[in-house]
Image (spheres, rainbow, N blue to C red):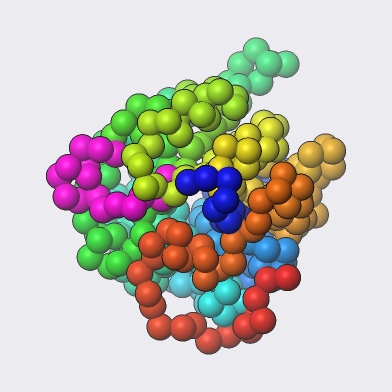
Amino acid sequence: MSLEDPVVITCSISGAIANREQCPAIPYTPAEYGAEARRIVDEGGVMIHIHARKPDGTPSYEVEDFQAITDAIREQVGDRVIINFSTGTIGVPVAKRIDYLRACRPEVAALNMGSMNYAKYSRSRRDFVFKMVFANPFEEIIELLQAMNELQIKPEHECFDVGHVGSLPPLIDMGVLHEPLHVDCVMGVVGGIPPSARNLAAMVDNIPERSHWGVIGISRDQWMLVAAALTLGGSIRVGLEDNLYLPDGAMARSNGELIAKARQMTVEVGRRPASVEEARAMLAIAEREPVAGAGAEGPR
């Protein structure tokens, strides 16, 4: 990738941890996901990363919840956005995760590339807000990859450290992972690589050639990492799963506000946001039948 390449702007619409007590804009119901998707696309987002929730906000791994959210998004924006499902979780069998991929057939699915301590630390409390072991053994990675290959779903490799990037070449050599890759460097999680422009550059230097790459910045360091990725030639992700605040410290009133800021930063550094058609080509996403629905005019 280079500075000449257009920037794929992704939105992490709603994670599995943050709730409305922390940010009222987080969508819970399918209709709310659909309304947020419209705001995202209107502001230039071309991919939406989805963790499903039940209408009361409880995280869900059920086919019917992923399907209802997907249908609501397609009703609002048609084929003008790439849908990306999370497969990362703790304690949910791989078979259950494959079930919702098979039933709903997203174009992209996230694939966590290694096990790690996963935590959030509070300096004021001098204690962890939460801490857990996020297990992603090779056996599970390969099983998920085989399912994605069968279903023609493009894997998005989420790498929380340089060692996770190093897990990619063996899978390519085994023939279960096919280039060109779509790799995201996740930075800002305690237990993963510390968030800095230099560390991002080090991760990028280890990503296999011909790969598309981007950054996922968590919490307060997100905007610095967005700026670093843009200047290094990468793509970017923002959204209410990753960070609730705009660069000036104001809480975002929607995912659309975060996407608008990301688009503004893209243009201000002299790069161009990708259209959804360009994004599909850059990520080598398998062609599908067009999806009917609103929003055929595309992003502004």
* Residue depicted at 78% across the width and 43% down the height: 246
Q: Which residues are magenta?
A: 168-183
* Residue depicted at 40% across the width and 27% down the height: 162
Q: Residue 172 at what x, y percent from top left?
A: 22, 45
Q: State the residue in front, 236 or 158.
A: 236
Question: Is residue 9 found left or right of 20 in the rendered image?
Answer: left
Q: Residue 21 at what x, y percent from top left?
A: 74, 46
Q: Residue 132 at what x, y percent from top left?
A: 45, 29
* Residue depicted at 29% across the width and 52% down the height: 179
Let me know if residue 132 appears in the view. no
Residue 211 to residue 202: above or below: below
User: Residue at the top extreme?
Assistant: 126
Q: Quadrant of the C terminus?
A: bottom right
Q: State the residue in front, 235 or 12.
A: 235
* Residue depicted at 58% across the width and 56% down the height: 6
Instruction: Verify whether residue 160 appears in magenta.
Output: no
Residue 298 to residue 212: above or below: below
Question: Is residue 213 found left or right of 14 in the rendered image?
Answer: left
User: Residue at the bottom extreme?
Assistant: 292
Instruction: Verify whether residue 180 appears in magenta.
Output: yes
Q: State the residue in front, 117 or 148.
A: 148
Q: Name which quarter of the figure residue 154 lies in.
A: bottom left
Let me know if residue 167 appears in the view. yes
Residue 278 to residue 244: above or below: below
Q: State the residue in front, 19 or 175.
A: 175
Question: Is residue 244 found left or right of 209 in the rendered image?
Answer: right
User: Residue at the front extreme?
Assistant: 4
Give the mark count.
0
Q: Residue 62 at what x, y percent from top left?
A: 41, 63
